[in-house]
Image: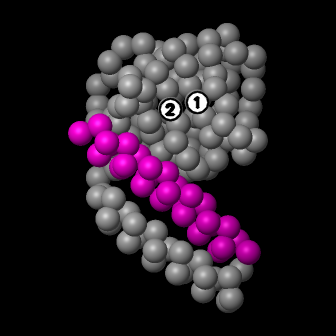
Amino acid sequence: MLLRIASPEKTIFDGKVKKVTLPTEQGEITILPNHAPVVTTLKPGIVRFVPVDQPEGDFVFSDNIISISTSKGMVFIDGEMVRVVTAVATASPQESAKTLEQMKLKLESNIKQLKQQGSIEEIEKSLVRLEKLNADIMLVNLKNKGL
């Protein structure tokens, strides 16, 4: 089965995989070859997959599973291919866990202020950024665990 994970900036991964696990609005789902066609929304979180071959690039591996953090997006499944389209995807965060935690604290503080003075749209956008930041923190912790 083919997997393509792309953002407007670039294609993060494009290759053959044995299975894919995705965070969706309905919960986490695992896709195997010949899966029934599905279109669903992607929730910010960690996409995990088992590649058929060792991919080139800087990926976070744990027990032969690659993990990539993603923001909101869409998933298109046709049984032969899984297409993940997301606003932002990170294969290997460049920031340290400490830096990401500081960014998280600042964003949480901003969200508190927005809840008092901001619009619903501003709050929702900030909450989505917070979810992506949490996924990046999880990814950094996986990366550090593997070192």
Locate the N terminus by quadrant.
top right
Task: Name the residue located 31 percent from the left edge and 42 percent from the top edge.
Answer: 145
Task: Name the residue located 52 percent from the left edge and 46 percent from the top edge.
Answer: 70
> Which type of secondary structure does the marked residue at label 1 adopt?
strand
Question: How far across and how far down the image is residue 17, in percent?
Answer: 49, 17
Q: Which residue sits furthest front?
A: 145
Colour scheme in use:
one colour
What type is the residue that disc 1 sits on? Answer: Thr
Question: How far across and how far down the image is residue 106, in percent?
Answer: 45, 77
In the image, taking residue 58 as reference, residue 35 lies left or right, namely: right
Q: Residues within 10 Å of mark 1 (few under 14, many from 20)?
A: some
Number of the label disc, if any, that sits on residue 48: 2
Task: Name the residue located 32 percent from the left edge and 66 percent from the top edge.
Answer: 99
Q: Is residue 87 visible?
A: no
On screen, residue 38 above or below 130 = above
Question: Do callouts 2 and 1 mark residues in contact (Cβ within 8 Å)?
Answer: yes
Q: Main secondary structure of the magenta part?
A: helix
Q: Quadrant of residue 77?
A: top right
Task: Name the residue located 44 percent from the left edge and 36 percent from the top edge.
Answer: 67
According to the picture, the residue beneath numbered tag 1 turns out to be: 21
Q: Quadrant of residue 33?
A: top right
Find the magenta span and give its range.
120-147
What type is the residue that disc 2 sits on? Answer: Arg
Q: Of the residues under marks 2 and 1, which one precedes in the sequence?
A: 1
- How far apart are the alpha carbons under marks 2 and 1? 5 Å
